[in-house]
Amino acid sequence: MNAFQPRTDDMNFILFEVLQAPAQLQALPVHAEADAALMQQVVEEAGKFVAEVIAPLNREGDEIGAQWKAGAVTMPPGFRDAYQAFWQAGWPSLACAAEDGGQGLPAALEAMLYEMLSAANHGWTMAPGLLHGAYECIKHHASPELKARYLEKVATGEWLATMCLTEPHAGSDLGLVRTKAVPLADGRYALSGTKIFISGGEHDLTDNIVHLVLARLPDSPPGPKGLSLFLVPKFYEDGSRSAVVCERIEEKMGLHGSPTCVMRFDEAPGWIVGEPGKGLNAMFVMMNAARLHVGLQGIGLLDAAWQKADAYSKERRQMRAPGGSAKAGEADLIEQHPAMRRILDAQRAWIDAGRVVAYRTALELDILKNHGDATRRELASRWCSLVTPVLKSAWTDQAFHGASACLQVFGGHGFVREWGIEQIVRDSRVAMIYEGTNEIQAIDLLLRKTLPDGGAALLQLLADIGGELGDDAQAVRVKAQFARFTSFLRERLLPRATAKDAPADLAHWLADDFLRAVAMLLMAWAWARIGATTGGYAPRWQATQTGFWRWVWPEFDMRLAMLDASLDAA
């Protein structure tokens, strides 16, 4: 079994050459010193840390797993030492503000770090995965007193954080949450209720855990508008422990290195974060950050699967390949067989395009936070709003199905533990579910972000990124498909989906195919950008771009046909 090795050369090429990140970032005063040399040094050091410290723990993390006993959780061997080294080296605080104990570096570097971490050891990475979202939530919504007490600890990663939303009866429908928060005389609130599926709800990685919890005040109205957000630590400042109990950890299909906890709050004192009844507003800051990271998980896990399959295909010989090079009586390498080459090139096409889309999203987040021009910030907000659900849904879907395809390269060996590919298939499946299921991402894109404004924001986004392309043959081809989709949206989908006689559930039937069509367009744009940068695709990228246009892009036609069929049937 080969451990994951970050391919920082490919990652740097996307960030520095395709996206020209330093020029964009140095235009922001906060990142004026973030030149290519500094950023590349950070990426290279991150790659070394991930390869040397985190990746070697992946197998034991899966086989031994997190262990629960009498309310306490012991993490797999090596996990605590690795985490202590992680936060003390400053990795959790890369993109946090310097005044909060962070390093103030671009969000793109944090994105690249977490892509590598997820690929190397998804279970371990679940622990720090919510830190930046918790940091943003506390920074923007907590009282000055709470910030003074908790912000720097979370920013630096000295203390880990959780996001306590789900309850046994309330998964995606948070309006059903029943956990109660009763005011106390000292200004705090006593929280009572049970939360499930809480990643890292209990562990021994850090000396404290900061729980961010959705709950209801006694006089709150039913539904999502009655929810408030509260902070409940594992330990208070005086050293006393809160009345928060880990009842058990779930036995899961994968992610055995991450404790998925059932947490019981027994009148546990905590503080309100933000305004009463505005809990979802505060929590969505955390959830939106998490959705970008989940999209990056998809890219990283697919890369890990591809690396294993690609390496195996270069070692294993089987049969004679059409046009193969083996001598008489010998077998060809698996990579020479067209069926295997198709799998490898198609998955690589998803990885490379995904990096362009994800790193661009991280750049837009920095622009949204730091650019001095309101118009430019609005453009960045539009990108993040529209692209994040596509990134989360399409690339986590591909992580699972693409990893399964990569397992096929191993044949029967892929189905046994020895090679490690089956673990990636198991671990990747949950990313399609958490932080908003992929179906919810599709509904969000179409029903909340496209139909209400008549498609204006999405059409403008496509016009803008189409305008970034040149006049080479590939760019012209992509722009023609953008125009085709624009016409379809204006002339076919929008009029029918918003018609007074349209079935109430029509848009819901369309949502999944709509999101996948947009994902294909973003991939086509990404590959046109790569092609322009490599001068018509250098040898390293030639087979992969062929894999995209031949084996991935035809899905665009299929999705439009499926949308047409649904519209005709309505």
Image (cartoon, grey):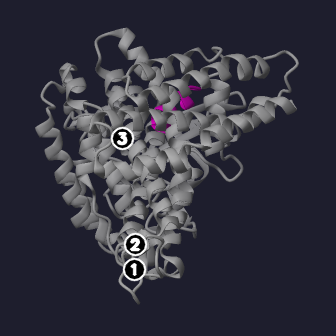
Q: Which mark is residue 313?
A: 2
Q: Report helix, strand or loop for mark 2.
A: helix
Give the residue pinned by disc 3: 132
Image coords of residue 448 (percent x, y): 64, 25
Mark 1 crowdedness (10 Å alpha carbons): few <14, some 14-19, many ≥20:
some
Q: Is residue 469 magenta?
A: no
Q: How many marks?
A: 3
Question: Is residue 119 shown above or below 73?
Answer: above
- Work out which quarter of the rendered image holds the N terminus and state it: bottom left
Image point (29%, 50%), residue name: 539
Image coords of residue 520 (percent x, y): 54, 38
Q: Separation of disc 2 and disc 3 at Cα?
A: 38 Å
Q: Report helix, strand or loop for mark 1.
A: loop
Mark 3 crowdedness (10 Å alpha carbons): few <14, some 14-19, many ≥20:
many
Disc 1 residue type (three-letter): Arg
Give the residue pinned by disc 1: 316
Image point (58%, 70%), residue name: 251
Q: Separation of disc 2 and disc 1 at Cα?
A: 6 Å
Closer to the chain start, of discs 2 and 3, is 3
Closer to the chain start, of discs 1 and 3, is 3
Disc 2 residue type (three-letter): Ser
Question: Is residue 349 shown above or below 489?
Answer: below
Span highlighted in magenta in the image: 274-288
Residue 255 in view of the camera: no
Q: Quadrant of residue 376?
A: top left
